[in-house]
Image: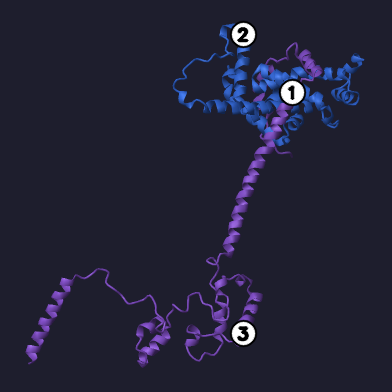
Chain colours: A purple, B blue
């Protein structure tokens, strides 16, 4: 049995259908054929043709412009992401090859790490082999900033001259051998640096110094009198 | 020769026009379809001058693109499709124009307080009952959404079959039937005062 899927009942709208059929039939104008044949004989199809051409132009230009804009946006977006992939700040933290290379080397003193330690040929070979292994297994650490590559002396992201070897400084303090404590702290060994201790920012008045001196003298005198 | 052509069917005439470029065959087809097409476009758009132009354009398109007609289709559905497409385009163009004209001169909204002549208005005493009825039906038909109006006109005024309407509108028969149903239902609501009285 066929179901009436569209709830279709012609009888329900019988009166409406009757009214619509009773509507007077519109007829074409008397000169319709004459005008048409004149147009055809004169080849006067401009109206029909230009409408079609305009339509085609709109149809093509608008989506093409939209597509172009989308492509530009997508291109810039993906390009930005590619750049960000190379951005060292966005990379996960990695162990520096030069330090990881030193881990297995037996160290005689802490000086070898931070001081004037020079890497021997053996170390360089070891570091290079480590690098090669890393290159094979971890392609993401291929690109490194140039200043971090080894060139004879262990290259660190800070200047050795201006850095402080805290281990050594502590050692010196413990033994009390080296008096030049400031140089030991700065790791300069009297090489001279811009650091000369801490100063008070304001200038002290001479009168103030003299009054202070006078006070100290009077205190000294009092102290001597008491002990006499 | 022309008398013989008059006895041919629509499909035979278009074949004659396609094969031998017989202008008489074309003229006979124009004569046969100019009135039904004018009635269809007029009921759809509601303006006589524009409907005449559209039917003229339909006939010119038919003349220029006669070879795009394929013999397996009915000629009437093919020509109705052309006219329907042109009428729909005209309706879209008019909507765009209305939107533009509404968007323009927004500042002058308050100043615009002039009367517009309703060219379709004729005093009731000049009408017979039937004429009044037809005008009310026309107005109700105009109030229908174009998608419903089109199919209702094709079915109930032009008396095309559901299959033909489906071909003309490029819709499935199910969609055509449901749209006709909805269109009639809406019309019934709009015209309940007429047929109950």
Tell me where residue A67 sits by quadrant: top right
The residue tagged 2 is B128
Q: Tell me whether circle 3 and circle 2 mark residues in contact (CB < 8 Å).
A: no
Q: CA distance from mark 2 to mark 1?
A: 43 Å
Determine the image quadrant of residue A186: bottom left
Which is in the foreground here, disc 3 or disc 2? 3
> What subunit carries mark 2?
B
- Callout in the foreground (2, 1): 1
Chain of the residue under the numbered disc 1 shown in the image: A
**Residue occupied by mark 3:** A126
**How dense is the environment of label 2, judged by Cα within 10 Å: few (below 14), some, or many (20 and up)?**
few
Mark 3 belongs to chain: A
Q: Residue at x 76, y 22 (%)?
A: A45
Q: Does residue B84 appear in this view? A: no
Q: Is residue B51 left or right of residue B121?
A: right
Q: Position of residue A225 (x, y in %)?
A: 7, 88
Are labels 1 and 3 on one chain? yes
Q: Is residue A39 or residue A114 the one in the foreground?
A: A114
Q: Nearer the viewer, residue B20 or A105?
A: A105
Depth order, front residue of B183/B114: B114
> Is any part of residue B54 visible from this angle?
yes
Disc nearest the viewer among 1 and 3: 3
Residue A46's tag is 1
Within 10 Å of disc 3 (Cα), the crowding (few <14, some 14-19, many 20+) is some
Q: Callout 1: 10 Å neighbours few (<14), some, many (20+)?
A: few
**Could you tell me residue B17's position as x and y percent?**
87, 23
Question: Is disc 2 placed on a helix, strand or loop?
Answer: loop
Q: Secondary structure at mark 1?
A: helix
Looking at the image, residue B62 sits to the left or right of residue B97; the answer is right
């Amino acid at each position: 049995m066929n179901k009436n899927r569209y709830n279709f009942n012609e009888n329900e709208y019988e009166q409406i259908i009757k009214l619509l059929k009773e509507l007077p039939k519109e007829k074409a104008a008397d000169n319709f054929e004459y005008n048409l044949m004149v147009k055809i004989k004169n080849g006067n199809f401009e109206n029909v043709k230009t409408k079609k051409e305009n339509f085609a132009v709109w149809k093509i230009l608008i989506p093409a412009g939209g597509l172009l804009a989308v492509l530009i946006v997508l291109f810039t977006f993906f390009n930005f992401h590619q750049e960000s992939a190379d951005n060292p700040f966005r990379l996960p933290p990695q162990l520096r090859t030069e330090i990881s290379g030193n881990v297995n080397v037996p160290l005689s003193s802490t000086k070898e790490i931070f001081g004037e330690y020079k890497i021997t040929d053996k170390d360089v070979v070891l570091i290079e082999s480590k690098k090669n292994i890393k290159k094979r297994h971890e392609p993401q650490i291929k690109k490194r900033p140039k200043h971090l590559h080894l060139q004879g002396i262990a290259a660190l992201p800070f200047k050795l001259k201006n850095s402080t070897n805290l281990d050594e400084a502590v050692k010196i303090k413990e033994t009390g051998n080296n008096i030049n404590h400031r140089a030991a702290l700065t790791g300069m060994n009297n090489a001279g640096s811009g650091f000369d201790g801490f100063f008070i920012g304001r200038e002290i008045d001479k009168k103030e110094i003299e009054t202070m001196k006078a006070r100290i003298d009077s205190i000294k005198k009092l102290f001597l009198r008491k002990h006499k | 020769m022309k008398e013989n052509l008059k006895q041919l069917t629509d499909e035979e005439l278009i074949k004659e026009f396609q094969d031998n470029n017989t202008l008489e065959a074309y003229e006979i087809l124009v004569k046969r379809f100019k009135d039904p097409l004018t009635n269809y476009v007029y009921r759809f758009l509601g303006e006589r001058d524009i409907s005449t132009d559209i039917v003229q354009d339909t006939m010119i398109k038919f003349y220029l693109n006669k070879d795009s007609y394929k013999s397996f289709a009915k000629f009437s559905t093919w020509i109705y499709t052309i006219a329907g497409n042109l009428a729909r385009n005209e309706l879209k163009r008019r909507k765009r124009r209305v939107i533009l004209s509404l968007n323009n001169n927004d500042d002058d909204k308050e100043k615009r307080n002039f009367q517009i002549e309703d060219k379709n208005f004729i005093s009731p005493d000049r009408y017979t009952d039937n004429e009044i009825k037809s005008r009310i039906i026309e107005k109700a038909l105009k109030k229908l959404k174009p998608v419903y109006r089109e199919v209702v006109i094709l079915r109930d005024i032009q008396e095309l079959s559901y299959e033909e309407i489906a071909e003309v509108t490029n819709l499935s028969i199910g969609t055509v039937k449901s749209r006709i149903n909805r269109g009639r239902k809406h019309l019934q609501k709009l015209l309940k005062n007429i047929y109950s009285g």
